[in-house]
Image (spheres, grey):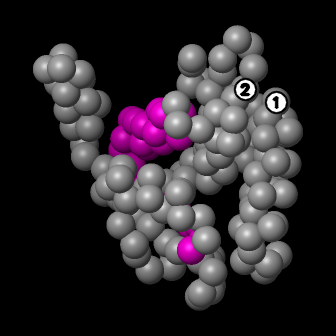
Amino acid sequence: MKIKRIDPKQAENLIQELDEYQSKLYPPDSCHLDSIETLQNENAYFYGAVENEEIVAIGSVKIFSDYGELKRIFVPPTQRRKGLAKKIIDKLEALLISKSIFLAKLETGPYSKDAIGLYEKLGYLICGKFGTYKDDPLSTFMEKKLEENYNDKKERDNTSL
């Protein structure tokens, strides 16, 4: 299993599956789904979990001047409980740190209980709206302060196992 940077077009089927899933949970005004074109912008980094040449999970981050916004984190139901979301988020956080960005933010919704649980487990806390988002009772905003020495700490943690 590799987590590697890919073109969002390569994961069009997963992006569409995520859109369909989100549209069942939230009305259109509360779905903040970046298009493939947006995910190809210069400030966006899109990753896939690749197994046997197949993209089995996705995630991206958009970089702004003082934070990175996680977007399109999605693991299809058949691939869940393998730690893929955590691996993708770890990769995105490491990318932010490598670019001297030490704050990760995201927007999800209150009906996405599994996602919120995962984000909380990974150290994300509820925060106020950010960027161009509007107040919306169907938006849950979260953030995590990233450690400058995150990669060093992770390496130490892995060697002490």
SS label for mark 2: strand
Amino acid type shown at disc 1: Gln
Q: Dot 2 corresponds to which residue?
A: 55
Specify the quadrant of the image occupied by residue 47: top right
Residue 144, given in percent of the width and then of the height, sits at 35, 58
Residue 102 vertical placement versus 12 (above, below): below
Q: Residue furthest top?
A: 52
Q: Nearer the viewer, residue 131 or 127?
A: 127
How far is mark 2 from mark 1, CA to CA?
8 Å
The residue that appears at 61% across and 48% down in the rendered structure is 73
From this view, report whether residue 76 is shown above or below residue 155. Answer: below
Which residue in the structure is indicated by mark 1? Answer: 10
Spot occupied by residue 160 in the image (x, y as percentages of width and height)? 14, 20
Q: Is residue 104 magenta?
A: yes
- Labelled pair 2, 1 in contact (Cβ < 8 Å): yes
Q: Residue 62: horizontal and vertical position, in percent?
A: 59, 51
Q: Is residue 129 left or right of residue 155?
A: right
Q: Amino acid at mark 2?
A: Ile
**Mark 2 / mark 1, whichever is N-terminal:** 1
**Residue at image location 82% in from the left, 48% down from the top:** 17
Instruction: Give the magenta range.
Output: 83-110
How many numbered callouts?
2
Q: Which residue corresponds to the image point at 85% horizontal and 39% vertical from the top-left?
A: 12
Q: Is residue 108 left or right of residue 14?
A: left
* Label 1 Cα crowd, 10 Å radius (few <14 / some 14-19 / many 20+): few
The secondary element bearing badge 1 is classed as helix
